[in-house]
Image (cartoon, helix red, strand yellow):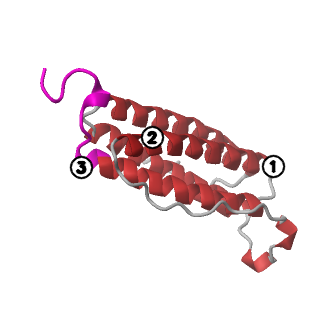
């Protein structure tokens, strides 16, 4: 069948797939580290649970992405150290992220992650890589829906101006 037939795992990665996997790994390393810091700043228990869910999602993605790079003989990018757990009360008020700021950052990051997953799916020639990004996309969308509900329930959602004044016909 040629080089692009048979078992997808036997096909070589193209440079775009390598870059997508490698850069996805870098981003996930940073998100885990950054969100551990956000967790220390968060006061709302529902928000803390979503942060934990996102960190666990990223750790799962890291395991899969690292395996692909290792299997294909590609060096892993450096990872920042795990962040220690801190008491929110020990963070000075002027240096502390507040819950709506944290939630907004999570929302923006999830939206960017959905776009990155879509791009990874669309540029992959290996079915297993495209399917992996499809799974990542679905998981991010599910957490994004929970976060949207939380933002609405807590009054943290800042929508753009709503168009409610319709011109007469």
Q: Is residue 10 above or below residue 148?
A: above
Quick one: SS at disc 1?
helix
Nearest the viewer among 85 and 67 is: 67
Q: How many marks?
A: 3
Q: What residue is at 42 percent from the left and 48 percent from the top?
A: 167
Q: What mark, if any, has residue 45 been given in the picture?
A: 1
- Residue closest to the far right: 89
x, y percent for residue 154: 75, 50
Residue 138 position in % (x across, y down)? 49, 33
Q: Name the residue tied to disc 3.
A: 15
Q: Pick the residue in front: 74 or 53.
A: 74
Query: What is the secondary structure assignment of the residue under circle 2?
Result: helix
Left or right: where does residue 30 sit relative to residue 52?
A: left
Which is closer to the viewer, label 1 or label 2? 2
Q: Is residue 104 visible?
A: no
Which region of the structure is painted magenta?
A: 1-17
């Amino acid at each position: 069948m040629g080089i692009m037939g048979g078992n997808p795992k036997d096909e070589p990665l193209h440079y775009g797939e390598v870059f997508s996997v490698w850069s996805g790994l870098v981003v996930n390393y940073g998100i885990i580290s950054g969100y551990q810091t956000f967790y220390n700043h968060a006061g709302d228990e529902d928000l803390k649970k979503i942060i934990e869910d996102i960190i666990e999602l990223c750790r799962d993605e890291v395991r899969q992405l690292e395996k692909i790079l290792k299997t294909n003989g590609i060096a892993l990018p450096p990872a920042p150290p795990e962040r220690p757990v801190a008491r929110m009360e020990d963070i000075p008020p002027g240096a502390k992220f507040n819950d709506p700021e944290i939630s907004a950052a999570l929302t923006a990051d999830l939206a960017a992650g959905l776009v990155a997953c879509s791009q990874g799916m669309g540029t992959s020639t290996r079915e297993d890589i495209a399917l992996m990004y499809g799974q990542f996309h679905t998981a991010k969308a599910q957490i994004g829906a929970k976060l949207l509900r939380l933002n609405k329930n807590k009054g943290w959602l800042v929508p753009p101006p709503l168009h409610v004044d319709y011109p007469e016909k």
